[in-house]
Image (cartoon, rainbow, N blue to C red):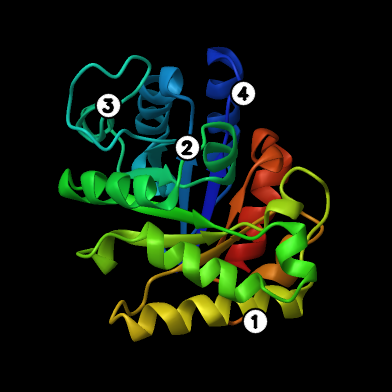
């Protein structure tokens, strides 16, 4: 199954979110394509209501853009995994590069969040990626597998896990890794996961994905879907990417 994940980040108001979901719902997909939408926390309830009104046949599930590793407590501004479940989420995004950079989240914290999320029944989309210096110095694969090793808890449910490879230098820059670079990195991630006994974990590519490059990326054997940022805010773009996965 191909996964098309939309990370809305800190964008959209209620009206534009409702309109976007309605237009996504007009894009037909089969059972071989699964769509995940990660709205801001304030839009999750609206997204759930709108999705349910459209109908479950659109194959859209919802996720939170982050969660705390604690079940509750004095954590102003944070949201627990249980809260996401109660709001109607089935997924959570953890370890996104913007969280790692802007909020100084280290991989051990990401592992704790992954453990907490899965304990509440959420599926986790765990993000890893290298910066431009690490790529140009030939350390990209070593960097990413080391980040993955530190970001996974000791006990992890492979059935509730997906990995999103997002090279930092290709996020929001318009730059994308070449198909050969993507294939090589995804194969390295797949190999590492298999060595841990985590089989059949989907590995998505994220990094300035758009309708122009989606088909080439999704055609790669090692790519199980895409995590889309800016292009997911435009209905025509995300629907075109979805249809590329469908076809």
At numbered mark 2, what does the secondary structure look like: helix, strand or loop? strand
The residue pinned by badge 3 equals 87
Do the numbered discs 2 and 1 sit on residues whose CB atoms are within 8 Å?
no
Kindly identify the residue that appears in the image at 35 percent across and 85 percent down. Answer: 195
When asked about the image quadrant of residue 216, the answer is bottom right
90 sits to left or right of 166: left
Q: Which residue lies under the disc numbered 2?
A: 38
Which badge, 4 or 2, is on the more N-terminal residue? 4
At label 2, counting other C-alpha atoms closer than 10 Å, the crowd grade (few under 14, some 14-19, many 20 or more) is many
128 above or below 47?
below
Task: Label 1: state its secondary structure.
Answer: helix
Pick whichever, 64 or 71, lies toward us: 71
Residues at marks 1 and 3 touching, judged by CB atoms closer than 8 Å: no
Crowding around mark 1 (Cα neighbors within 10 Å: few <14, some 14 to 19, many 20+) is some
Indicate which disc, 1 or 3, sits on the residue closer to the N terminus. Answer: 3
Name the disc covering residue 11, or none: 4
- Residue matched to label 1: 184
Which numbered disc, 4 or 1, marks the residue that appears first in the sequence?
4
């Amino acid at each position: 199954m191909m996964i098309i994940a939309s990370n809305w980040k800190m964008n959209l108001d209620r009206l534009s979110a409702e309109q976007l979901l309605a237009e996504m719902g007009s894009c037909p997909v089969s059972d071989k394509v699964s769509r995940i939408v990660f709205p801001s926390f304030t839009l999750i309830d609206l997204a759930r209501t709108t999705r349910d009104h459209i109908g479950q046949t659109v194959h859209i599930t919802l996720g939170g853009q982050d969660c705390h590793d604690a079940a509750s407590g004095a954590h102003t501004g944070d949201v627990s995994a249980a809260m996401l479940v109660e709001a109607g989420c089935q997924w959570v995004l953890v370890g996104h590069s913007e969280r790692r950079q802007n909020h100084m989240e280290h991989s051990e914290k990401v592992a704790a969040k992954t453990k907490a999320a899965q304990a509440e029944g959420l599926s986790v989309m765990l993000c890893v990626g290298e910066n431009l210096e690490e790529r140009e110095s030939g350390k990209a694969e070593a960097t990413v597998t080391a980040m993955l090793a530190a970001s996974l808890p000791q006990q992890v449910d492979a059935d509730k896990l997906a990995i999103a490879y997002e090279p930092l230098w290709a996020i929001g820059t318009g730059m994308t890794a070449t198909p050969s670079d993507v294939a090589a990195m995804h194969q390295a991630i797949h190999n590492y996961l298999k060595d841990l006994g985590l089989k059949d974990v989907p590995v998505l590519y994220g990094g300035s994905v758009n309708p122009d490059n989606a088909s080439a990326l999704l055609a790669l054997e090692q790519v199980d879907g895409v995590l889309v940022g800016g292009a997911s805010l435009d209905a025509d773009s995300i629907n075109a990417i979805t249809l590329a996965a469908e076809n």
